[in-house]
Image (cartoon, helix red, strand yellow):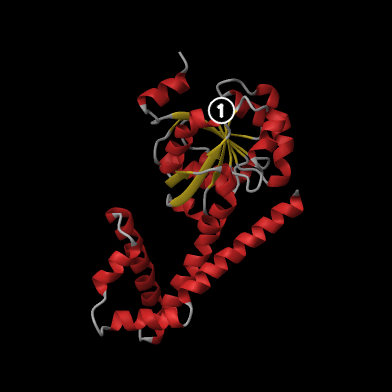
């Protein structure tokens, strides 16, 4: 029986045999989320310098090793989080040990699917994921795409990254835009929170209180949309009244270009990442 197909059929993703190849900052965040959520049968973590992974050595069913080939042979799902410059070398190293059971998940920015297929074969289950830094607190917005074969196993990747936040499957052609909206987007939202903090200080709160007010108000706004499924303008209407302070503040922000600045900034970031890709090609 194909165990992976059985999991897909019954929608069971409670425990899996996973290897994280190249367990740096991102890999460690993924590992912590999987361990916390009890999402593994076994977990292999690889890195050249094992002292950086000492905190994982006491966990049950977690193996730390510098041998990528051992990790691959003992796992079904392979999450690659190596440096982009090392990815091709690592793929060459593990290619002889890949079987029909393996699901290859790449977190490497800009390394497109056809390049992975060219190295290990288009018959492999290949999935690209683009998480953001909030994965460290299990709140990542992660975008996924796959090759034709990988689409048969995309639910497995969704199950993994839904344990670490929220996931959305998109065409690979949209991955660059998703990088701007979700990965760079963390920085954009941080700047908005910082600006709100600065305003709160000017209005009389001390720095710690101001940041607390800004952070939790931001979290509440997002949670309302996530929970209710409303358009942002619907929630804005709930707190604006005729001749009130909220609408006056909103209008002043729009006069100063709040929305247009955000949009233009994100488009500029997208143009930059597009130019980088052209240079790489």
Report the residue at 51% width, 70% height from top.
262
Where 38 falls versus 200 (above or below)? above
> Total of numbered circles in the picture?
1
Query: Within 10 Å of the Cα at label 1, are there few (<14), some (14-19), or many (20+) other Cα atoms?
Result: some
Q: Position of residue 157 (x, y in %)?
A: 48, 36
Pick whichever, 235 or 164, lies toward us. 235
Q: Residue furthest top?
A: 1
Q: Nearer the viewer, residue 21 or 190?
A: 190
Q: Which residue is mark 1?
A: 149
Across and down, in percent, residue 178 comes to 53, 53
The quadrant of the image that shows the N terminus is top left
Residue at 61% x, 63% y: name it.
Answer: 269
Up-down: is 140 above or below 187?
A: above
Q: Secondary structure at mark 1?
A: loop
Vertical order, 19 against 264 (above or below): above
**Looking at the image, which residue is at 55% across and 64% down?**
266
User: Is 146 or 34 nearer to us in this picture?
Assistant: 146
Report whether 130 appears left or right of 225: right
Tell me which corner region of the image, top left, top right, bottom left or bottom right, holds residue 235.
bottom left
Q: Position of residue 95 (x, y in %)?
A: 69, 26
Residue at (31%, 80%) from the top-left corner? 247
User: Could you tell me residue 105's position as x and y percent?
Assistant: 57, 36
| 106 horizontally vs 60: left or right | right
Can you say whether 215 is above or below 121 in the image? below
């Amino acid at each position: 029986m194909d165990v992976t197909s059985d999991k897909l059929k019954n929608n069971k993703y409670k425990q899996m045999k996973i290897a994280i190849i190249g367990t740096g900052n991102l890999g460690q965040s993924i590992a912590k989320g999987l361990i916390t959520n009890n999402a593994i049968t076994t977990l292999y973590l690889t890195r050249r310098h094992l002292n950086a992974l000492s905190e994982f050595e006491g966990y049950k069913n977690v193996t730390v090793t510098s041998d990528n080939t051992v990790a691959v042979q003992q796992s079904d799902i392979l999450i690659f989080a190596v440096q982009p410059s090392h990815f091709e070398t690592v793929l060459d190293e593990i290619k002889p040990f890949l079987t029909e059971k393996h699901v290859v998940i790449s977190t490497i920015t800009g390394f497109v699917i056809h390049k992975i297929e060219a190295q290990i074969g288009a018959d492999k289950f290949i999935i690209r994921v683009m998480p953001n830094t909030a994965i460290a607190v299990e709140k990542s917005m992660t975008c996924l795409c796959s090759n034709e074969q990988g689409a048969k196993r995309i639910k497995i990747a969704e199950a993994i990254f839904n344990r670490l936040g929220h996931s959305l499957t998109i065409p690979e052609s949209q991955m660059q835009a998703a990088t701007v909206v979700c990965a760079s987007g963390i920085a954009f939202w941080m700047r908005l929170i910082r600006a709100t903090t600065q305003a709160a200080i000017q209005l009389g709160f001390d720095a710690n209180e101001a940041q607390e007010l800004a952070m939790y108000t931001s979290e509440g706004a997002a949670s309302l949309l996530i929970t209710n499924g409303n358009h942002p303008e619907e929630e804005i209407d709930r707190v604006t009244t005729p001749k009130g302070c909220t609408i006056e503040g909103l209008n002043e922000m729009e006069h100063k270009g709040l929305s247009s600045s955000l949009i233009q900034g994100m488009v500029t970031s997208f143009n930059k990442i597009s130019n980088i890709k052209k240079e790489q090609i």
